[in-house]
Image (cartoon, rainbow, N blue to C red):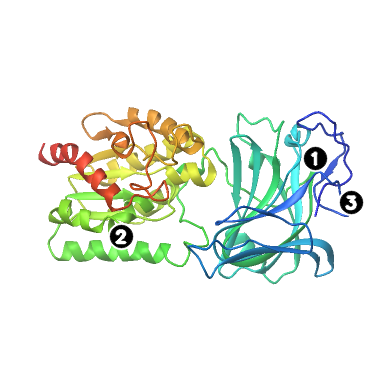
């Protein structure tokens, strides 16, 4: 199904749009250069060319019971609606793509992105709205809680300021994916009448990208909701039991799923290196800097007095939302400042954000490297120390091996052994000084 309505496109690449007040992506009329692509976690995207499409499963599927598909047609009185259906999916998406990049600059200042949404089933899922505004420009808005509150209420009209998708250096001159509906977990959602409006009136809020990384909040991804807060309570209880037993952890690790992995793939390495220190791993899968801040402010290190707090966080800020390096660094600095207040006698060992993606030139690898350049300056040599262990994980040519990180992000046992061995001289010095 092709999807552009009421527009005149110039023949030049990077299409220039006439100055209509409304730029319609999906409506009654169509233009054959645009399409709807349905994407899943496994396998290539599939173009919606008829009434329905399902993403085929690979032979070695990691989620054999999961599925991602979509259909086009009338939903609750709205014709030509696009319905995304997904089950047990790490990722599902419905995006507008396949044509020359759009020039949206005329709509960026004071304009809105508007569409109708019908949340049919979202008890076990979450949705997000995104835009690819350039070759290395990806903007994503979470809408999990708000969408769940809309379930069963029929069609709702949403209007977001385009400022929700813009950052300081964006120009929106070449936008290859002007709108995408992304999802995870399980659910069913329909969308229709997608358009950009000059001088539109927003009716939906969005986070401020300039402060999101430093504003404490729980992790709100749908897949995390069932266990994130219970894990937080579990960690509080584990700390309480340690104190009741007269034990004081000498080392505390703080971070995201990579740190949580000490309890999984890295468990045997942990026992060899850190069990004698009564060490604690406060790693939560999916965490951004603001989620770590929330956990600290809600007691996760209260009553502890470790000699060293090992901090490594930030890769989800980059990978999930492509936060600017300055924003990620600000979030990390806020965590360090909070730790210094809560653990005034502890030393903070700040680790460079680990490498990700196979090639050194990959976008997220470079983004993390830019973060590391900034946070290295947070070390003062007295209370805060910085260590970049990243070279230990890499091949001589700078590539990242799947033997170390099978998904090019999370270490396997070999990766945790490299981490522990590379950090050991630094940690021992801090523990004995």
Label at residue 264: 2
The residue tagged 3 is 29
Q: Earlier in the sequence, mark 1 or mark 3?
A: 3
Disc number lying in front (2 or 1): 2
**Residue 171 spot, x, y in % from top left:** 68, 30
Distance Cα–Cα, label 3 vs label 2? 53 Å
Q: Secondary structure at mark 3?
A: loop
Q: Quadrant of the N terminus?
A: bottom right
Q: Is residue 226 left or right of residue 143?
A: left
> Would you place residue 12 above or below residue 189 in this image?
above
**Residue 38 spot, x, y in % from top left:** 67, 56
Q: Is the Cβ of the residue at disc 2 closer than 8 Å to that at disc 1?
A: no
Residue at the spot x=38%, y=37% of the render? 333
Disc 2 crowd rating (10 Å Cα; few below 14, some 14-19, many 20+) is few
Distance Cα–Cα, label 2 vs label 1? 51 Å
- Where, by quadrant of the figure, is residue 139 drawn? top right
Residue 297 in view: no
């Amino acid at each position: 199904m092709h999807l552009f309505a009421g527009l005149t496109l110039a023949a030049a690449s990077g299409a220039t749009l006439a100055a209509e007040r409304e730029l319609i992506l999906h409506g009654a009329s169509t233009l054959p250069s645009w399409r709807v692509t349905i994407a899943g976690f496994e396998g290539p995207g599939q173009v919606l060319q008829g009434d329905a499409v399902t993403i085929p499963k690979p032979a070695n599927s990691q989620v054999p019971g999961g599925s991602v598909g979509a259909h086009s047609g009338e939903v609750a009185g709205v014709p030509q609606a696009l319905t995304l259906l997904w089950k047990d999916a790490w990722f599902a998406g419905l995006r507008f793509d396949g044509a020359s990049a759009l020039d949206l600059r005329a709509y960026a200042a004071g304009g809105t992105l508007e569409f109708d949404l019908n949340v049919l089933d979202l008890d076990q899922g979450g949705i997000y709205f995104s835009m690819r505004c350039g070759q290395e420009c990806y903007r994503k808005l979470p809408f999990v809680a708000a969408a769940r509150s809309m379930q069963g209420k029929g069609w709702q009209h949403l209007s977001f300021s385009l400022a929700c998708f813009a950052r300081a250096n964006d120009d929106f001159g070449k936008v290859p994916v002007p709108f995408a509906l992304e999802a995870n977990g399980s659910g069913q959602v329909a969308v229709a009448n997608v358009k950009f409006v000059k001088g539109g009136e927003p009716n939906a809020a969005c986070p401020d990208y300039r402060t999101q990384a430093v504003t404490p909040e729980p992790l709100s991804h749908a897949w995390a909701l069932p266990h994130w807060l219970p894990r937080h309570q579990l960690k509080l209880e584990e700390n309480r039991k340690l104190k009741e037993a007269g034990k004081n952890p000498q080392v505390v690790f703080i971070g995201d799923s990579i740190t949580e992995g000490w309890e999984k793939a890295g468990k045997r390495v942990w026992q060899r290196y850190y069990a004698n220190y009564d060490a604690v791993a406060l790693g939560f899968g999916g965490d951004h800097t603001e989620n770590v801040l929330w956990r600290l402010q809600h007691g996760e290190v209260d009553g502890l007095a470790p000699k060293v707090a090992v901090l490594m966080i930030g890769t989800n800020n980059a990978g999930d939302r492509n936060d600017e390096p300055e924003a990620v660094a600000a979030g990390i600095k806020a965590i360090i400042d909070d730790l210094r207040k809560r653990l005034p006698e502890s030393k903070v060992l700040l680790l460079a954000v680990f490498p990700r993606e196979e090639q050194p030139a990959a976008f997220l690898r470079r983004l993390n490297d830019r973060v590391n350049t900034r946070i290295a300056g947070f070390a003062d040599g007295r209370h805060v120390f910085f260590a970049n262990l990243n070279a230990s994980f890499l091949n001589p040519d700078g590539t990242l091996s799947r033997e170390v990180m099978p998904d090019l992000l999370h270490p396997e046992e070999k990766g945790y052994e490299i981490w522990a061995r590379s950090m050991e001289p630094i940690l021992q010095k801090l523990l004995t000084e």
